[in-house]
Amino acid sequence: MIKRTVNFKIYRYDPDKDEKPYMQDISVQLEPSDKKLLDALVRLRAKDDSMSFRRSCREGVCGSDAMNINGKNGLACLTDVDALSQPITLRPLPGLPVIRDLIVDMTQFFKQYHSIKPYLVNNDPAPERERLQTPEDREELNGLYECILCACCSTSCPSFWWNPDKFVGPAGLLNAYRFLADTRDQDTNARLDDLEDPYRLFRCHSIMNCVDVCPKGLNPTRAIGKIKDMMVRRAV
Amino acid sequence: MNVAKRTFDAVIVGAGGAGLRAALQLSESGLKTAVLTKVFPTRSHTVAAQGGVAASLGNSTEDNWHWHMYDTVKGSDWLGDQDAIEFMCKKANEVVIELEHYGMPFDRTDNGKIYQRPFGGHSMNYGQAPVMRSCAAADRTGHAMLHALYQRNVRANTQFFVEWMALDLIRDGDGDVIGVTAMEMETGEVSIFHSKATIFATGGAGRIYHSSTNAFINTGDGLGMAARAGIPLEDMEFWQFHPTGVAGAGVLITEGVRGEGGILRNASGERFMERYAPNLKDLASRDIVSRAMTTEINEGRGCGPDKDHVLLDITHLSPENIMKRLPGIREISIQFAGVDPIKAPIPVVPTCHYQMGGIPTNYKGQVVVPHEGNPNSPVVGFYAAGECACTSVHGANRLGTNSLLDLLVFGKSAGETVVEDLQSGQLALKPLPANAADVSLARLARLESQTGGESVFEVGADMRRSMQRHAGVFRFDHLLKEGVQQIAEIAERVKRTEIADKSKVWNVARMEALELDNLIEVARATIVSAEARKESRGAHVRDDALDTAENPNGRDDANWLKHTLWYSEGDRLDYKPVNLKPLSDDVEPIALAKRTY
């Protein structure tokens, strides 16, 4: 790859000095080694150190650099910059309050995650060794435990936009099913009771934006469907 | 600036594996605890660990902690303290089983036990053959572990201060640690966290190098804070270069790939590790493999048009096995190397990965410094665990999977020690000096008013390039000397960095400038300690330390079997003995020997 210039249109807002948000046109020359959108943003910061976004692992496992890229949520570190049409339009994740530039306030998102009791409940006395689990039972957790809490899914979900305080959202529900599906967990009934609510679970209308944007290729809609199945099976 | 004061029994800085494990001990004991973290806890760099955590569970092959201890001491090139190593290897099963009980989704054997895979430098029967000791959740062990630990802390109601950056350690007139200053990213406001006990779990500083597997946040904040407050840093010349970073990108490819059967090949397709480590081959310890790769490249047997990397080949493994055991590696390889490892080998180079040195601690997690003739005198109120600490279990070279074990064992141990010290009334809330926040406020004021300085980006880039050139896989006297000079010059430039962004709200520029203050302490410690050590040991290998009968592999035990202590003030060096005596009578000391694999 060669040196090339890319053009951006980026949402800017610093409450310390801006009366209101605006879109900034800015371009930057990339080095041959700059491949991902995050590389380009780091290059941009060398030019304008006020350009603010979160980042950490730069390999798609920490979930810091989620943003809205040309209209679709994704991770900057896993997005090939040369594959994007220009100007590359960057906005903060939709539906959450903006703190500054591409940095959103994720309080509501984590509140919903915490609301599903995201921890194993097993009230038996702890055995001396590991609790046994067959490889097949363990496989049930695949596609669930890999969630990185980046919020790409929940902030692309219209139901979450309308009711972020009442609807758990795809990330929280995927994690709820991660514990429902774990043969070591004993809290199934209480977990289902907690979700049996017109909003917490049933605001999901299978729009499937979550599946479309998940940078880890996970499927929250399927997990939500499985929770609904469990409720039905429990009722009969 | 108005400085708010908050008071706690204990303050933990950092919410990666070590910080979260320590926090559990404190939260479950009902002590008033604050966990400060620069990033949301599950964004901490433990999340990026891949291959596994060591424990001699013996689920698939026979194993015991004696063999694990032997491998760890040998891996450390005898620089590891044998009391701490015994403690860690003995505790391994307990902390891994605990984690399973917390809900960690380990892979399973056919009989339902925790899945274990072979890993570099881990052997059965004192070096005879590879052993299956690495407990794994596919190739996402760190992610699964960090989330399980965070989830357990949610259950324990741990109080987090998320996106708060700790700035400076507060010590009183007696030298006791009584808290930290910290800045809230969202508001830019500075607070004092006044506490009876302070635990550092701030992780490593791999970002002193240009090519690193480490996250952006790995800036050695705890080390910088400790060094500025007069605490020495131990064994900072020892940096692990992981054999398999993706060429060009630096992203980590786990050693678990070789544990599952992956093979390193040079340009002619030769499995070259057979020449360097006839017994463990590709699963020799990391320093050995990284040097072998570098030698292959330096001697013209590298791959690609520039002959600048080697290949990691798993094309002979079944696609099913790759999808099941190494799914994350496949993703990373496609994303960052443009290669599907099912079909073609992955281009890899040795890449800076882990800091063996750090803040000197004992196996209880207490920070220890030389004082009145005692080389290991505890600093009252100060504890550390995880990569930021030098306990020292890794000595001159860490074995893969021993870092996740380190953070579990010593995170827990530091937490337990703090609980004991608090409940026994040994630790009291000491009065806060009037000037407690002055150092931090002066650093911030300097940044506000600096003119005519250089950008953080430029100075940081020069530091990273200089460290890469002068303190890499192989070390040369003239380059080390030049490096000491260059880093000293760069350290002067760090004092005059200038930022354009002066906003109070989530100011990344200010954060990066403060991080560079920490990184440069680590860079200075590294280059000065490395230049001084005139032998080869573990990850520190000099071309002028020759392999002789008295000095096997260039290791000079008569003069250099000792820990380095670097003090920031005046770049002063001191040394202290290695503890060659185990903690208990359960095991004989592991006697010095030449390292071969």
Image (tube, coloured by chain):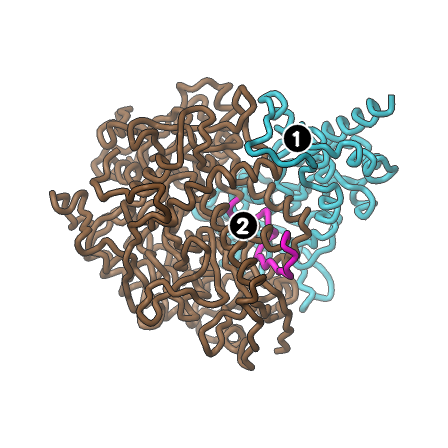
* Colour assignment, chain B: brown
Span shown in magenta: B28-46
Quarter occupied by residue B26: bottom right
Subunit under mark 1? A
The reply to whether the magenta stretch includes residue A104 is no
Please say if A61 is above or below B453.
above
Percent position (x, y) of residue A134? 59, 22
- Chain with cyan colouring: A
Q: Using the image, tell me which numbered label, if any, was put on residue B117.
A: none
Q: Residue furthest front?
A: B585
Q: Is residue B236 visible?
A: yes
Quarter holding the C terminus of chain B? top left
Q: Going 48% across and 42% down the picture, which residue do you hit?
A: A35
Q: Tag 2's secondary structure?
A: loop
> Residue placed farthest to the left in the image?
B549
Query: Is A26 in front, or is A109?
Result: A109
* Residue at the spot of label 1: A184
Look at 56% across and 39% down and name the residue there. Answer: B99
Residue B16 disc label: 2
Kind of residue sitting beneath label 1: Arg
Q: Is residue B447 visible?
A: no
- For the point 24% across and 59% down, the residue is B531
Q: Is residue B237 left or right of residue B542?
A: right
Question: Which residue occupies the foreground of this view, B30 or B238?
Answer: B30
